[in-house]
Image (cartoon, grey):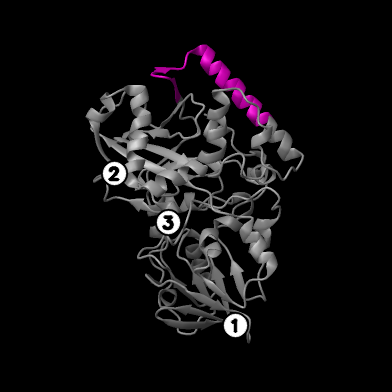
Amino acid sequence: MPLLAATRRRFLGGLLAATALPVATTLPGWARAEAANPDVVIVGAGAAGIAAARALAGEGLSFVLLEAKDRIGGRAFTDTASFPGLAFDHGCSWLHQADRNPFLPIAKAQGRTLQGHDDSGEAVFVGDGGANDSGRTAYGRAWDAVKAKLREMGEAGLDEAPGPRLPSMPPWSQVSKAWIGPLSMGADAEDFSAADYWTLAETEPNVIVREGYGAVVAAYGAALPVRLATPVTGIRWGQGQGVTVETPAGDLAARACLVTVSTGVLASGGLRFDPALPPAKQAALEGLPMGLLAKVALRFDGRRFGLRPNEWLSYATKDPRLCYFLTWPFDQDLMIGFVGGRFGFEPSAAGETAAIDFALGELRRIFGAEIDKHFVAGRFTPWAQDPQVLGGYAYQRPGARGARQALAEPLAERLVFGGEATAGLDSTNCGG
């Protein structure tokens, strides 16, 4: 299947073992009590903030964990209310690099229902019919040509956008470019760096979680003391030996501060730094804007339209305004549509109703009015409009080589930036 088998370099996956996270879901009693004068203030209770808090507790260091939302997990969020009886991950869904993803043993210890998702298959449509043998052959050739060009650029270390160099084999080259760009990197092939793309690890092996990836992350952080609904408005880090973190509930002094919020939030100016971040950090943020991969979840009444569980649905098109689908995950009555890159911001701005209408319209082109007869309810993930996120995950602009490492470099040994944007070859992934 193209999305999972051909997006990123595979050999990197075996070169770096994941930093082991403790599997136990409970913490010592002393760690569950918040420190009055902490060693570290952690900003953001997503996967990175939770992992950092547990690591600090394991080292006997004290911390305060601050989260602007009224829940933990960040972009790992499982929704069980929108579709009663079904779990829908608004954010991360796949445990990528499952052979070394630290959340896999955690999910197993939690007793989650897991399933491999590398041989899922793909239903490919041309108009209102499935692709014939010649169409699939042309699709395969387009994939091979796109992959070959990406490999060529990556091995050459070209820090430029691959889009202008990718072969044009319409309509199949557009399908391949969509999977690789908007629906994988969260950015169009004209916007991200080929060198950064090539550096990122391959996603395989991939595992999905019936109860939701977000549920795994939330349960892993459930024992931690967290101040919810506590946004950080400023960080003073240039005086004395420590830092002062400003919140509407008051200031906190600590030896150091770890900031795990998205690059979108950092670039928005909503979090003030005193003194201002140095030019190298500002340049790193400019080089790591937020891409977008948003989801349109559609519940149906049991009608399956000839589609199999856990497979992909794509269609031939020359239009970058598209929505490809995951069908019936875990044999549930959901289709999960994906929109991303530049176009993804359009339905995000238009709102949930417009996004759902667009996704249904794409299905209507294939299956006709039958779709509307069996549609029950839909949801759209508003990450682009979420003030605590402002996108999906960070991609590197062409010409911004080294931005991920530059952002992760500590300032004065007291201010550190973490999160998916700084996770090296595992950047863009929750397990990173």
- Left or right position of 169 against 153: left
Residue 280 x, y percent position in the rendering: 69, 65
Helix, strand or loop at mark 1: loop
Determine if the magenta segment contains residue 145: yes
- Left or right position of 36 against 361: right
Instruction: Read off the magenta span.
Output: 123-148
Q: Which residue is mark 3?
A: 217
Q: Amino acid at mark 3?
A: Val
Residue 282 x, y percent position in the rendering: 64, 64
User: Which quarter of the picture shows residue 332?
Assistant: top left
Decide which of tag 3 and tag 2 comes sooner along the chain: 2
Disc number lying in front (1 or 2): 1
- Note whether 65 is above or below 190 in the view shown: below
Q: Is residue 61 visible?
A: no
Q: Residue at x 67, y 61 (%)?
A: 283
Q: Amino acid at mark 2?
A: Leu
Q: Residues within 10 Å of mark 2 (few under 14, many from 20)?
A: some
